[in-house]
Amino acid sequence: MIDILSEIYDLKDEKRTGWELRHVEYPETVASHSWGVSFLALNFMPEDLDSEKVLKLCIVHDVAEADVGDIAHRAIDADKETSADKKQELERQAIERYSRDLNSDLDELWREYDGKVSEEACFVKDMDLIDMCLQALKYENQHRYDPDEENENFQEYEHMDEFFATTRPRLKTEKATEMFQRIKSRYESVKDSRSS
């Protein structure tokens, strides 16, 4: 049990790949991202959702990354290049092992989140995306990367634009869409002031 817990605690050090690819200085970790998702969910959760389930899904949603790493779908780096199906299979295997070794329901929670089979899972996925956009805004505002740097990973987008462009079509809830619009508007203002 201690070995599994120690492995899962590696999430506290596992840096988020998307930010590393963007060359962000001191990027957040997977665990800090999960905290952000949990905090957003706690504060913006609709009353009709099961709050205990929502918070469990927030905590569990990226636990498998302790084993497989934070694999970005768009990574050009050959070491990180993995299909979405392969990533999902690797994560499923990891979460099943954790669930078995800890005698817990991690696998059931993860499958619910991954399949977005409940309103709670859809809401948590939206908060996952909103957290990413808030983090992009934070990095833009704090000048934690060089937008003018030659970056082979971000040739088709400027600044943090990709994180916003890929988020909007994936949002399912009205609350998340409203939050997204407000965050994106602030991001555009910060980006424009940084560019001038």
Image: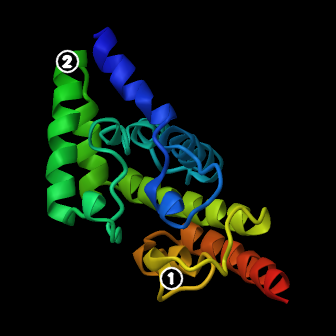
Could you tell me which secondary element the residue under label 2 belongs to? helix
The answer to whether residue 1 is left or right of residue 142 is left
User: Would you place residue 145 above or below residue 7 in this image?
Assistant: below
* Residue drawn at x 16%, y 33% as measured from the top left: 96
Image quadrant for the C terminus? bottom right
Q: Nearer the viewer, residue 28 or 164?
A: 28
Badge number at residue 101: 2
For image coordinates 28% across by 36% down, the residue present is: 67
Quadrant of the frame with the N terminus: top left
Q: What residue do we see at 63% from left, 79% from top?
A: 159
**Label 1 or label 2, whichever comes before in sequence order:** 2
Neighbour class for label 1 at 10 Å: few (<14), some, many (≥20)?
few
In the picture, residue 42 is in which quadrant?
top right
User: Where in the figure is residue 24, as x and y percent of width and height?
Assistant: 61, 60
Display colour scheme: rainbow
Distance from disc 1 to disc 2, alpha carbons, whole Å, reads 39 Å
Q: Which residue, given by chain and number where applicable, does mark 1 sit on? A: 165
User: Amino acid under label 2?
Assistant: Asp
Horizontal side, residue 67 vs residue 47: left or right: left
Q: Which mark is residue 87?
A: none
Q: Is residue 169 left or right of residue 132?
A: left
Q: Is residue 156 above or below residue 37?
A: below
Residue farthest along the top direction in this orientation: 2
Q: Are marks 1 and 2 in contact (CB under 8 Å)?
A: no
Given the image, on which type of amino acid does mark 1 rest? Ala
Say whether residue 151 is left or right of residue 78. right
